Amino acid sequence: MKFGDTPVADAQGAVLAHGLRFAGGSLKKGRVLSAADVAQLRAAGIASVVAARPEPDDLSEDAAAARLAAALGGENLTATAAYTGRCNLYASAHGVLAFHRDRLDRLNLVDEAVTVATLQPYDVVEPRQMVATIKVIPYAVRADVVARCEALAQEAGPLLRVAAFRPKAAALIQTAAEGTKQGVLDSTRDVTRARIESLGGTLAGETRCAHRVEPLVKRIQAALSEPIDLLLISGASAITDRRDVIPAAIEEAGGTVVHLGMPVDPGNLILLGEIRGKPVIGLPGCARSPRLNGFDWLLQRLMADLPVTRQDIMRLGVGGLLKEIPSRPLPRAEAEPRPATAAPRAPRIAAVVLAAGLARRMGSNKLLAPIDGVAMVARAVDAVLASQAQPVIVVTGNEPDKLRAALQGRDVTFVHNPDFAEGLSASLKRGIAAVPQDCDGALVCLGDMPRVSPKDLDRLIAAFNPVEGRAICVPLRDGKRGNPVLWSRRFFAEILALAGDVGAKHLIGAYPEAVAEVPTEDDGVLIDIDTPQALAAFTKA
């Protein structure tokens, strides 16, 4: 990639490295300079710009990031569209993020141009939670670098995957010594049930016996006669030796002790065994508490069908110190739970499709006009439904029954605007008011733009990041802004205050610092159909 000071006369097609402000306009960094941009720079008297120009053996930052995301992402992971060299991977299931740290390290050591950041191996993740981000640092990277990274990412299958929790059934056996309070046993049962259920499983049964080998063997054999996937044993006292009551009973019942102990504190005194192909866990005393401990780490893997060897357990020491630190010195039993930090998640973006207009210039309702046998509005809505936007809200006005019929069978929410004759703002406000409260923003789409593609919409969603100053995302084609526009919830109040036959375009000019221009690959974002002549030209094309 060539990078540096570039004469404006030679800058068409180059990527602007730094934003520019000048009399009559401004250009943001990362913009691929068009002929119109070059003319504007010349008119402003600017002779040169700092720009990047890919060479023949380079891949653009977005193409490289997209390829790497495809190579990295395995089971239960979805990737966003690439934007500014970044692709994010999100979980699509509740489970455990599984990967080998050394493979990730090897990939990040290939070249400084490519970076992959993830959560910790074996972290529990929720659907829509971000688990990894791929960022290509320069505007372009050599294709051979990307190929080397892809090979590492696919060396033994995709590097990253989410192992989903399975609806496993567990049985709990508790041993009691003389004087053991039933309330303690009841509490342990309830805490254990909550742990299992939080991972999608069930506590199928709980029994109790004396803390001796013989009665415990009978309880183990009885539990294994039931349809369970996992056996848990909570002892009246901690397991301190392989010849102690719980390991001795496991072996006498025909099982084996895989490993005793764990370099995780609290959780050191845990046992992993196996009987008849089923895992058996001898619980540490800390498992009576709902607080995070080593039992959680082992249980999470087993509930996700991830194999656990004794070597796996012995490698848990790094990060395994879970006790209080000076900033939180209270004893564990007395400390109040601290609020969990919200995990990054995919933004939830709704889509509002405006389909209420009078279409005076068409002479009839243009949205019902057939294009290749499909109503124009249906083509526009189908593109939105194929994107990542959810839910899809269609605002009707003129001939609402016919519009509903044209969209029959599609997963959309209809909102009727009886005041559609008052102009665009009335329909826009109806649509924005219907966006669910848990949505972060909304794509405002036009029913008369049948060539906008799902890829265009997903690219706008990928660009959306209000924290980084991208709260209004506008598609850009050959230096021209088009539609649809993605609006952060931050602007909903101002949109709801509009009046007359106007949209929210003036807000783009009022908040330039919040605007992201998102390049698209075709002209669909610029083409709306307002006249019979435009429709005829479109259908011929």
Image: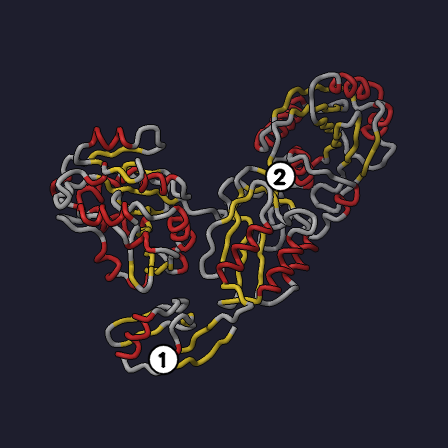
Q: Earlier in the sequence, mark 1 or mark 2?
A: 1
Give the residue type that dot 1 points to. Ala
User: 290 and 147: which one is in front?
Assistant: 147
Q: Residue tagged by mark 2?
A: 163
Give the residue type that dot 2 points to. Ala
Residue displayed at 77% across by 35% down: 272
Q: Residue tagged by mark 1?
A: 9
Q: Is residue 245 above or below residue 501?
A: above
Q: Is residue 142 above or below residue 454?
A: below
Q: Is residue 209 above or below residue 274?
A: above
| Residue 341 in view | no
Please tell me whether mark 1 sits on a helix, a strand or a loop.
helix
Front disc: 1 or 2: 1
Q: In the image, which disc is placed on residue 320?
A: none
Q: Is residue 373 left or right of residue 295?
A: left
User: 320 and 480: which one is in front?
Assistant: 480
Residue displayed at 68% across by 59% down: 106
Q: Position of residue 13 (x, y in %)?
A: 40, 70
Q: Is residue 228 left or right of residue 12?
A: right
Q: Position of residue 79 (x, y in %)?
A: 51, 48
* Tag 1–tag 2 contact (CB < 8 Å): no
| Residue 500 in view | yes
Residue displayed at 54% across by 38% down: 93
Q: Is residue 204 left or right of residue 135?
A: right
The image quadrant of residue 290 is: top right
Q: Position of residue 229 (x, y in %)?
A: 69, 25
The image quadrant of residue 481 is: bottom left
Q: Position of residue 359 (x, y in %)?
A: 15, 43
Number of marks in picture:
2
